[in-house]
Image: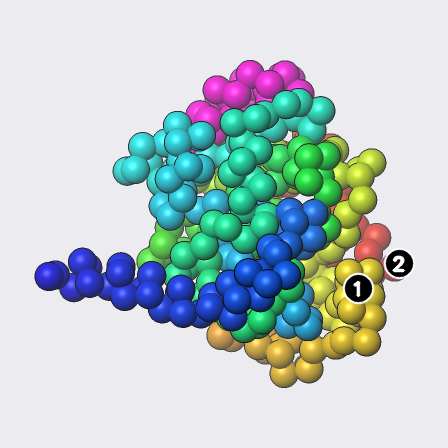
Amino acid sequence: MSGADWRKPARRAVATAWRSGELLRFAVSGRPAASAAIVVAGVGRSGSTWLADLLAAAPGLQEIFEPLHPEHNAEYRRLLRLRSGDAQQYKRAYLRADGRWPQWDTLLEKTLSGRIRSYRTDYHRSRFWPRRFVVKLIRANMMLGYLYERFRPRIVFLTRHPCAVVMSRLQRVRSPWYADTASLLADEALVADFLQPWVHLVEQERDLLGAHAVWWAVENAVARRDLQQRSHHFVFYEALCLRPFEILGTLYRDLGFANFMVSQAFVRHPSRVTAATAYEDMLAWLGLWQQKLSAEEQRRILQWAERLEIPWYSMDRLPVGWQDA
């Protein structure tokens, strides 16, 4: 048996052993409903892993990491009509909040109730006897309204400066972030709802910087519209970096953990997908994109946020008006 052949069953065995406590608990008390889930959503490279780790430290919570990853979820891949070799393609499902998408309901219910699991989803074990799940998703930003209407989970939406996100993606060497805009323009509903005035400009964004800028704007615009009139928690990544205990205190209280707070060491420890030096100088870290991207690149990225009417960011490193709040 080759190295690759034995690793997969070994990892499955380890993941099953990790879940033995929750399987015993749920056999007695029943599995938590999808409505009990805490969903941490945000575009990739926005800090969602860090925030999910922090929330999952609260009593009785177990983190489920990216159960909708196309490389590890054949059903998600089928619904998106992705072939196995296309698993890295930057493609997302857009589900109108007032629509009916029965073909997605089973997958999404299993996702929120903790039924889609693997070694990868359970890599970070926060509880042996969990009662509820923190489900971390970067592939659900264009279906959050639908998720809420169908299942009523607690949604925490995180956003980060688009220039910082795009820079972070472009810097990935070992696991590059591929993106294009073809699947955006192929979605008639998405074009009608958000992109109709900008189709000709989207078609001109053929490099990675432009494609990621468009995707950041679209995903955040859909999430902003869908969550505006629905219960959710909104977090700026920059605010979480600069005032972590203030932000976390509000989240823990509102999520039912008023007497809990993580340690300073836990807050300052970078997530497993972040560079170890990320938190040494927070303001410098938040403004790193101002040094790495040219003024023209910054303008290109921010133009897409402006076109899709996202008012949160400017050429400054901090969210508009947040530092004065």
Q: CA distance from mark 2 to mark 1?
A: 25 Å
- Specify whether residue 186 is in view: yes
Is residue 310 part of the magenta span, yes or no?
no
Q: Where does the C terminus fall, quadrant-wise?
A: bottom right
Residue 304 % position (x, y): 63, 34
Is residue 190 part of the magenta span, yes or no?
yes
Whether residue 217 is situated above or below residue 204 in the rendered picture: below
Q: Is residue 12 left or right of residue 76?
A: left
Q: Is residue 116 left or right of residue 232?
A: left
Q: Nearer the viewer, residue 164 or 247?
A: 247
Q: How is the image coloured?
A: rainbow
The answer to which quarter of the image holds residue 284 is bottom right
Residue positioned 75% across, 39% down in the render: 227
Residue positioned 51% across, 70% down in the render: 21
Give the labeled residue for mark 2. 325
Residues rendered magenta in the picture: 180-204
Residue 179 % position (x, y): 43, 38
Residue positioned 54% across, 46% down in the render: 111
Total numbered labels:
2
- Specify whether residue 56 is in view: no
Q: Earlier in the sequence, mark 2 or mark 1?
A: 1
**Disc 2 residue type?**
Ala
**Disc 1 residue type?**
Gly
Q: Evaluate if marks 2 and 1 touch, with contact meaning CB atoms under 8 Å apart.
A: no
Whether residue 122 is situated above or below residue 216 in the rendered picture: below
Q: Secondary structure at mark 1?
A: loop
Give the labeled residue for mark 1. 256
Residue positioned 58% across, 71% down in the render: 129
Q: Nearer the viewer, residue 246 or 16?
A: 16
Q: Residues within 10 Å of mark 2 (few under 14, many from 20)?
A: few
